[in-house]
Amino acid sequence: MTEEGSNPGEQASPSNQTFSKETLWEFVPLGDYRPPDKPAVSAAQHRWVSLKRLFGRGKRDGNTPAKAEADLSGLPRERLDTLVRPLDWDAGAEVLRQTLARDARPLPVSFLIGPPGGGVADLLRALAARQDARRIEPPSFDDLLAGGTAWLDAWTGDAQSWVLPHLEHCWLRHPAGLESVRALLARASIGDLGRGVIGCDSWAWAYLRHVAPMPVAGVLTVQALDSQRLARLLRSLAAVDADRPLHFCNARTGKRIIAVNDEDDGDGGLDMQNLAAQAGGNPAIARALWRARLRSEPDGDENGESPQQDEPPQGERDTEIVWVSGLRDEPELPDSLREDAALVLHTLLLHNGLPAWMLAALLPLHRFRVQTILPQLSAAEIVERDLDDRWRVTATGYAPVRAFLRERGFPIGPL
Amino acid sequence: MNEQKISTLLRDLGAGALLEIALIVAGAAVLVIAVQKALPWLANRLRGKRRHFLLAMVPLLRLLIVLAAFLLIVPIVIEPSLQNMIAVLGSIGIALGFALKDYASSLVAGIVAVGESPYRTGDWVEIAGIYGEVKHVGMRALQLVTPDDDLVTIPHLMLWNQPISNANNGGPQLQCVAQFYLHPEHNADRAREALQDVALTSPYLAVGRSMTVVADETPWSTRYRIRAYPIDARQQFDFVTDLTVRGKAELMRLGIRFAAAPPLREGSAPADAG
């Protein structure tokens, strides 16, 4: 993994050296996926918040953060890159390769399904590099809207194995946008395209099952991490000085969540259980949520006063402390949102992100309406715009959006 | 009925008894108002089956409250013996039957409507040619809001002799139909597949529920009908509009022509258009 190598790996902590990649990556049939248990306290809190929202009193304190947390500042990107290094996709790809190779009766095409932001495409890109397989890029929007199978015909025919990381980008929810994906899946399933692996977002998968010839076998997903394995993963991602302990502490309670380079490295407790549940046990989503919540004390704070309510662990003068903010909070959808926003969010999830102009083309909404809704959702940290101009649901916004759409009866992704 | 008989029939209503009756009536009224306000308010914050269940509970709870109040008041007013009860209730029945026949009929039909549930709050029904969403089921009448936002009050007695068409029957979803009249000369397989894809790609579609495209011939066209369910019954007009707009666009993209009625000649009667 080149990105991994570009980081200060020389400073890797002992825990990083002992962490086994095999314990992180486990690929199982989609039906065998088991999400981590939600902590009982967290589940009760969630129901209580839902009840308060039902009675119009759901404005959570999170909108006006507690002073202690509000006093914290975000970490610079370079520091975040050190504290939460990228996942080792290459290791995951190797485990995936071994899993596929173990299949006694290999199918012409295998599928890897994951939630939005779950790293399926990264894994398959690493797999393609490792196996020297051909990497198939999705067709353009113009190609999709033109209908036909020109895109498919252009890359088929050679015997080389191939990898298609983004099936969700190979179709559009438009009468003209289904032909190529139907042809692709029909030809792939009978071996016309050779041996390949297809990655697909879980929402697109759930929808395509109703409109295209989808397989029933050879469908894998990443098994969920429990809180203890997640804690080990996050410790392994922190690259720090080997002789200086690093503590990640809850900014609200002051309690230590996990530690690196310390005798007692902690199991994460309730905070880590919450994080695992919010991320559905997915390593990439958990990493994104963790990274988004790391904070530091402001530089100008000369008094040494901690923003937390309780004192941090004693006797650790040289210990570096990084604060973790709002681990139990999720962004809330603005109350002013109407059904139009549900259509926008559902369409974004089905396609794992779309540009605003294409969103307007797929929805029965005027373009100005789409351009009004997206900034509102962005201000609430529900969606964000990527460098490739696609609007996507954020990692922190995914869980509340999924609940919002499920409540309204929309078909949702299984992960 | 002489004075002695009446005195044995009715109890002596002192101030205490009157106060008791007033309290029962007031309590029942408060409960009925609370049920009629609180449950719809709560239901409108929910979606799907839970919303319809709560809305359907309103007339049932109101009926139970009224019955309970009635059963509490009767022993206060009447000496509770079988003879007395038959005499008083029979008299009330005859009076209502003659003087307030339609009103009483509507009240009885309202009780039957709670039991048989031909319509519930939140249902989309058509009664006597009026289509709309049931907003309120009262003791005597129900109120519909039509798609044009008109509030229509219909007495329950229509239940006795009018057909009542209920589109969703207590569920959150109802079937919608979008129609297309195409020129008879076209590739029917292609048209049907295109219309199926139009339905499958609608953002309002309840994916997983049955969806069909049926076709038949009329004298001037081939008629196609998409039958499908939106996610929520309240999206039905948006859904049909979306199917119509995108269906037209897709059929035109495929080069399929729409039917056009032949021009009328001056002085001639229009032909049967089916």
Image (cartoon, coloured by chain):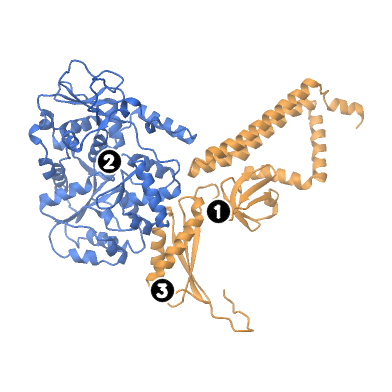
Which residue bears the numbered disc 3? B256
Distance, label 2 to label 3, CA atoms, is: 47 Å
Distance, label 2 to label 1, CA atoms, is: 39 Å
Report x, y in % for residue B260: 50, 76
Q: Quadrant of residue A273?
A: top left
Q: Residues within 10 Å of mark 2 (few under 14, many from 20)?
A: some
Q: How many marks?
A: 3
Chain letter of mark 3 equals: B
Chain A visual colour: blue
Say above or below: A309 vs B108.
above
- Of badges 2 and 3, nearer the viewer stands 3
Chain letter of mark 1 equals: B
Which residue bears the numbered disc 2? A33
Report x, y in % for residue B257: 43, 75
What's under tag 3, amino acid-wise? Ile
Chain B visual colour: orange
Q: Residues within 10 Å of mark 1 (few under 14, many from 20)?
A: many
Helix, strand or loop at label 3? It is: loop
* First in residue order: circle 1 vs circle 3: 1
What's under tag 1, amino acid-wise? Ala
Q: Is residue B148 left or right of residue A254?
A: right
Say above or below: B7 vs B210.
above
* Residue A308 vs residue A327, the one in the foreground: A308
Instruction: Evaluate whether label 2 is on the same chain as label 3.
Output: no
Which residue bears the numbered disc 1? B167
Q: Is residue A22 left or right of residue A42?
A: left
Instruction: Evaluate whether label 2 is on the same chain as label 1.
Output: no
Q: Quadrant of the N terminus of chain B?
A: top right
